[in-house]
Each structure stands twice: as C-alpha cells, then as structure tokens.
Amino acid sequence: MDLISSKITLAEKRIRYEQGNKLIRNFIQQTITFVARIGSDSNDDDDIRLQKSLLVICAFPFMVAGIAWGLMYVLFNEPFAGAIPLSYSVISLLSILYFRRTRQYVSSVLASSR
C-alpha cells in the first residue's frame, strides 16, 4: 500500500511542478508582452514598432543588472562604487518612462547612444 501512495504523491508532485512552471512561463510571457508594448503607437508601421519594442526589451536586462551590480557594491560596503550602476538603472528607468509617455523613438535612441 505504501508503494501506491508514494506513486500518487510523486504524480501529484509532478503535476504541481508542471503547474508551477506553467504559471511562471505565463507570467514571463505576459511581462515581456507588456514591456514590448511600451512606447508603441497605433500609427507606427511594423518596422518602427519592432525597433521600439527592441529598444525597451534590451534596456530592461541592463537596468536589472545595474541594480544587482550596484546592490552588491553597497552590500560590500562600497556605496560610492555602487552609486554608478544604480544611477544608470535609475536613469534608464526614467528614460523608459519618458519614452512610454511621449512615444518618441528618435529622442530615446539619441539619449541612449550618448
């Protein structure tokens, strides 16, 4: 009887694991879709829409990496060194928020290339 109950619990664990993976996958897909739509405009053609979504999607990992990098410096008691990547992350976030509000692709590209 113990073998049957242990098999059921393993099957239940596998189902729960797959459900958890599905939830995480759905969350990631929804987040990427939301981020990709930042700055999109209904009047944009497909090429401009793709460029806008790539601009925002590529900026987010660098922003997250800057936060992690800066926090590591702060945790190792180097706040001035950590201020540089943290500042970069804040400026990137403000730039993305500005881009979301204005939807101006050219000014955002010029700001990120400087």
Image: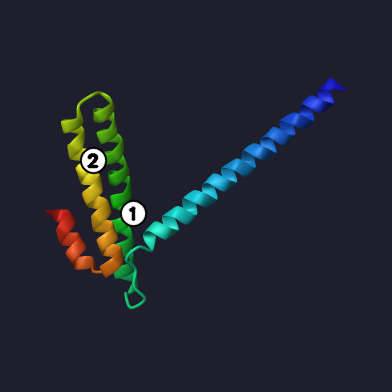
Residue 35 left/right relative to 7? left
Tell me: residue 67, above or below residue 50. above
Tell me: residue 20, above or below residue 105. above
- Viewer-side label of 1, 2: 2
Give the camera-side residue of 58 and 66: 66
**Colour treatment of the image:** rainbow
**Looking at this rendering, what residue extends furthest in the left direction?**
114
| Residue type at the position of mark 1 | Ile
Where disc 1 sits, the SS reads: helix
Q: Give the class, few, some or many, for how many residues have Cα within 10 Å of label 2's Cα (few <14, many ≥20).
A: many
**Looking at this rendering, what residue extends furthest in the right direction?**
1
Q: Quadrant of residue 65?
A: top left
Q: Quadrant of residue 112?
A: bottom left
Residue 44 in picture, x, y percent from top left: 32, 75
**What residue is shown at x 32% (from left), y 45% (from top)?**
61
Residue 27 left/right relative to 83? right
Residue 49 in picture, x, y percent from top left: 33, 68
Residue 102 left/right relative to 11? left
Return the residue at label 1. Answer: 57
Return the residue at label 2. Answer: 86
Residue 54 in picture, x, y percent from top left: 31, 58
Give the camera-side residue of 55 and 70: 70
| Residue type at the position of mark 2 | Leu
Residue 46 in picture, x, y percent from top left: 34, 71
**What residue is shown at x 20% (from left), y 43% (from top)?**
87
**What residue is shown at x 33% (from left), y 61% (from top)?**
53
**What residue is shown at x 25% (from left), y 55% (from top)?**
94
**Disc nearer the start of the sequence (1/2):** 1
